[in-house]
Image (cartoon, rainbow, N blue to C red):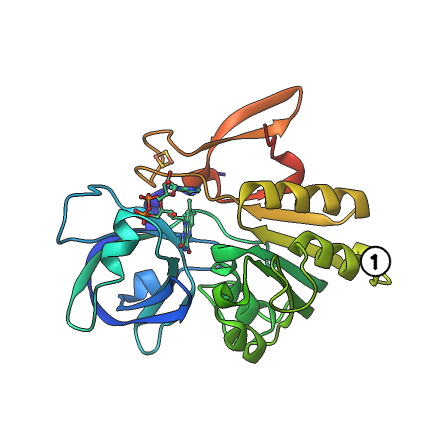
Amino acid sequence: MPHYADDAVFAKLAVIDNYAIAKDTMCLRVAAPSSMCAAVPGQFFMLRDLRSTDPLIGRAFALYDCDPQSGWLEVAYLVKGKLTRSVSQLGNGDSVGLCGPLGNSFDDRQTEHLIMVAGGIGQTPFLSLTKEACGKQSFGTRQTGYAKRVSLCYGARTKEYLAGIDSFEKSGATVHIATEDGSIGPPQRVTAVLEQLLKSQTDLSQVRVVTCGPEPMMEAVAKIAKTFGVRCQVSLETPMACGIGICFTCVAKVGCESDWDYKRTCVEGPVFESSEVVWH
Ligand SMILES: Cc1cc2nc3c(=O)[nH]c(=O)nc-3n(C[C@H](O)[C@H](O)[C@H](O)COP(=O)(O)OP(=O)(O)OC[C@H]3O[C@@H](n4cnc5c(N)ncnc54)[C@H](O)[C@@H]3O)c2cc1C
Ligand code: FES
């Protein structure tokens, strides 16, 4: 069932804060109306810097955190290209354009152990998911406290890029770190950490995996989940133009090798069952 932008609003929002959380990584907090604070884990917003027409269209950013009572929401971002470089210069008193909430969400059904696997900035959809799954906060009308255990397997190039670990731990997740250069622990990929964690589980039927990050990493995570017979959802980060289902820039192959169709990540995703994604 596509999630068209029926509940989305476009609004000019005041920046409350814009602070560094790791190397080249910032968190933007904006004052947001209740319709935007009703966003649920997995959903995203299209963000524009209203001072410029380059880029003219917004860029997609996952819901990182929000507080509907106080009326703010946050997106966390890697300073990477034109939009994120200019947004990183904003501060209290400035404003941005935000459209959302957009897209579908992660499964909120009961599970014994929810394992989140993040590569780089792919950790952003998982802070709200951790809070929800651990029963620390409710989002929209979804249930909370549906996971007995929540683990975050978090991979980064170096320890300087690891963002928000305290927030994840405070929200109830056990964090397992993998750095490619060995600046924390042995040099290894996050997929190795996931394999170790899955090997140590007594009942794999009660485990659910969710992943977000670079596509080769998500493909590898999907393969590992399949090998262990564990259900896995992926949050795809295909480049997007409109974000609302019109332009077909964001399509991904969904189905099976012999029978797939293009699905729009912005309205039929960004969350898909990994078993249904045709990676090449
Ligand atoms: C649903 C969704 C949620 C996202 N959530 C976040 C988030 O929470 N935090 C965050 O930092 N980023 C997130 N992204 C990615 C973000 O939208 C892009 O990185 C965006 O292009 C950054 O804008 P920019 O103008 O700074 O960089 P651009 O100038 O657009 O891009 C810089 C470089 O990255 C490449 N690029 C652009 N888009 C992508 C992409 N999607 N994947 C890989 N390479 C790309 C470009 O080709 C270019 O080389 C998300 C993307 C999607 C689709
Ligand atoms: S970004 Fe335009 S259809 Fe998805």
Q: Residue at x 82, y 62 (%)?
A: 201
Q: In the rendered view, would you say 232 is above or below 241?
A: below
Left or right? Give the position of 240 relative to 10.
right
* Percent x, y of residue 129: 54, 64
> Residue 269, can we see it?
yes
Extreme residue in the top direction: 258
**Front-most of residues 230 and 219:** 219
* Percent x, y of residue 179: 61, 61
Using a 10 Å C-alpha cutoff, classify the residue at mark 1 as few (fewer than 14 neighbours), some (14 to 19) or many (20 or more): few
Q: In the rendered view, would you say 146 is above or below 51?
A: below
Q: In the rendered view, would you say 169 is above or below 227?
A: below
> Residue 110, can we see it?
no
Q: Residue at x 68, y 57 (%)?
A: 188
* Percent x, y of residue 1: 50, 38
Extreme residue in the left direction: 51
Q: Quadrant of the C terminus?
A: top right
Q: Which residue is mark 1?
A: 199
Q: Quadrant of residue 156?
A: bottom right
Q: Quadrant of residue 56?
A: top left
Left or right? Give the position of 237 relative to 117.
left
* Percent x, y of residue 140: 44, 64
Q: Residue at x 36, y 72 (%)?
A: 68
Disc 1 marks a residue whose amino acid type is Lys
Label 1 sits on a secondary structure element that is: helix
Ligand 2 shown in quarter: top left
**Front-most of residues 247 and 135:** 247
